[in-house]
């Protein structure tokens, strides 16, 4: 929020206990999560809240095994539609090149340096989930079970 009247800290203090992205659980010690698309770790905290920060970055799975990086421009609080920059990295590109591109996008465009490692970890998790699952080999019988199987066949 880049308006002259309201600071990001004030917005966080007002919205931290109630907002559309907040997910509260009574189990597990009352853990709070966030569904904010600009929250890289999905934790409800000021550090990772993307809707509060002037500059934020979000990473989502793209089509055909790729990754989409969406970022907010700092000076576009009054024009949210024009403040979004979306970049697609295809699944054909190697994983290391994708990690390097995301790290450079966060570092060289003035986004927070402490989120660089978190962004690369998120891309890594998305790319890992997009890989095909290997079929596990058939279990080899050993000992008495192998002897019984040999006798029956």
Image (spheres, rainbow, N blue to C red):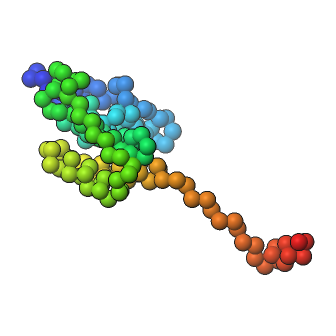
Q: Quadrant for residue 55, please give it.
A: top left
Give coordinates of residue 107: x percent, y percent. Answer: 17, 50
Give above or below for 151 relative to 11: below
Q: Residue at x 37, y 25 (%)?
A: 20
Q: In this orientation, does residue 131 appear?
A: yes
Q: Residue at x 81, y 75 (%)?
A: 146
Left/right placement of residue 13 relative to residue 149 reads left
Q: Quadrant for residue 23, please give it.
A: top left
Q: Quick one: quadrant of the N terminus?
A: top left
Q: Nearer the viewer, residue 111 or 85?
A: 85
Give coordinates of residue 35: x percent, y percent. Answer: 39, 33
Left/right placement of residue 151 relative to residue 135 reads right
Q: Quick one: quadrant of the C terminus?
A: bottom right
Give coordinates of residue 64: x percent, y percent. Answer: 43, 43
Q: Residue at x 27, y 30 (%)?
A: 51
Q: In this orientation, does residue 53 appear?
A: no
The tally of labels here is 0
Q: Nearer the viewer, residue 146 or 89?
A: 89
Looking at the image, which residue sits at the far left?
Answer: 4
Left/right placement of residue 86 relative to residue 10 reads right
Q: Nearer the viewer, residue 1 or 146?
A: 146
Looking at the image, which residue sits at the far right?
Answer: 152
């Amino acid at each position: 929020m880049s308006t002259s009247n309201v600071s990001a800290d004030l917005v966080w203090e007002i919205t931290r206990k109630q907002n559309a992205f907040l997910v509260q659980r009574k189990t597990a010690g009352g853990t709070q999560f966030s569904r904010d698309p600009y929250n890289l770790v999905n934790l409800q905290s000021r550090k990772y809240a993307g809707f509060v920060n002037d500059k934020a970055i979000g990473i989502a799975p793209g089509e055909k095994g790729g990754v989409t990086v969406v970022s907010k421009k700092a000076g576009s609080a009054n024009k949210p539609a024009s403040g979004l920059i979306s970049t697609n990295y295809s699944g054909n590109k190697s994983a290391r090149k994708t990690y390097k591109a995301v790290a450079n996008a966060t570092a060289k465009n003035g986004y927070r340096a402490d989120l660089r490692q978190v962004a690369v970890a998120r891309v890594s998790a998305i790319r890992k989930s997009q890989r095909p699952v290997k079929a596990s080999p058939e279990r080899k019988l050993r000992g008495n079970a192998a002897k019984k199987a040999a006798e029956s066949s």
